[in-house]
Amino acid sequence: MDQRLTLICGDAINELKRIPSNSVRLIVTDPPYNLNKDYGNNQDNLQFDEYISFSREWLKEAVRTLTKDGSIYVFMGMRYISYIYTILEKDLGLSFNSWITWFYTQGIGKTKGFSPRHDDILFFTKDPKRFVFNLDDIRIPQKFYRSVNNMRGANPGNVWEFSHMHYCNKNRMQHPTQKPEGLYERMILASSNEGDVVLDPFVGSGTLLRVCQQTNRIGIGIDSNPEYIKMCYERLETPFTGFDSIDERMKRVPNDLNDPEIRLSYIENHIKWFLKNHPDAIDDFIEEVKTKYFDKLVESNQLSLVESMKPLYSI
């Protein structure tokens, strides 16, 4: 396995205690929500006070490992998210940055009450001002080209739409709460740099390590289930053909790319900026370019150049 990646089979709290203080730049994790999920060797059904105590203990150890300019992202269900927020802010003294909503179009169905269609992610930093945030690495394409715009793209905001990991997805693992790689890609690119240590104390199906593997980070994953650890090893050995999910806005072609030189330069840059880790999305983007600018591409003799970009950038 990639020497930059470490898998640890053990109890999250015990294993976190072994990690040196101030050694981790970023934590991204999807802990148990205490919703009675079956995680193979354990059941997610603690009493309320037990769950809060468990959460406080692992969060305390996790925060201790963070560097002074480190950050943490925690997935959490609605029942407990306010308690997790309080622990992070009041008990552990972290600085709140963002409450991110992950919206998905399909999920659990209900016949009494409204079906849930989102998960939430809390983003806190150890220092209120001094922390890594690489906005240029996570921007999304603009709707319109304007010379005064930052054509590197816009801030993606705090509502993110990514497809759920359906059981028909070719990358779906035997894990009840697998998260899309595109979600982790955005958080890892935003809040760490190449070569940084990134940690997930509840690594599950290994999404964090897969993204670290492809973005040149040093990844550490912990899980108490040896079957999940084995699953992670197998996942990390499979060939990479692109992350298994994408924000559909990343394929958006701006309007008003009327100048031929600007248009060609932008299309080349778009692939480098937004689709670097998504080679399987390049074809859709090129087809959208052709649909929107076909006549102009023909007029400027650029059609063949644009059509050649897919094999040029594919993995």
Image (cartoon, rainbow, N blue to C red):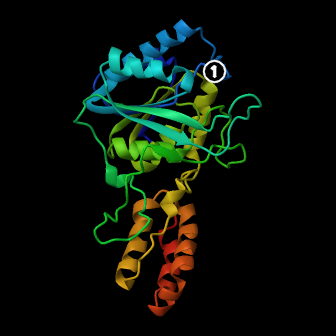
Q: Residue at x 55, y 63 (%)?
A: 281
Task: Classify 10 Å Cα crowding around label 1: few (below 14), some (14-19), many (20 and above).
Answer: few
In the shown orientation, is residue 61 left or right of residue 30?
left
Q: Which sits in the foreground, 37 or 112? A: 112
What residue is rendered at 53% in x and 45% in y? 181
Could one spot residue 19 in this view of the protein? no
- Does residue 279 sit above or below 158 in this rendering? below
Q: Amino acid at mark 1?
A: Leu
Image location of residue 88, percent across then percent down: 37, 21
Per the image, label 1 sits on a secondary structure element best described as loop
Please state the horizontal and vertical placement of residue 242, each as a whole percent of the image. Answer: 54, 55
**As drawn, 174 above or below 39:** below
State the residue lying farthest toward the right: 111
Number of marks in the rendered image: 1
128 with respect to 206 (left or right): left
* Residue closer to the observer: 235 or 91: 91
Residue occupying the far left of the picture: 130
Q: Residue at (47%, 16%) from the top-left corner?
A: 55
Q: Residue at x 42, y 42 (%)?
A: 187
Q: Position of residue 232 (x, y in %)?
A: 57, 36
Q: Can residue 51 be seen from the camera position used here?
A: yes
Q: Is residue 262 left or right of residue 234?
A: left
Q: Against 249, is 62 above or below?
A: above
- The residue indicated by pointer 1 is 35
314 to the left or right of 145: right
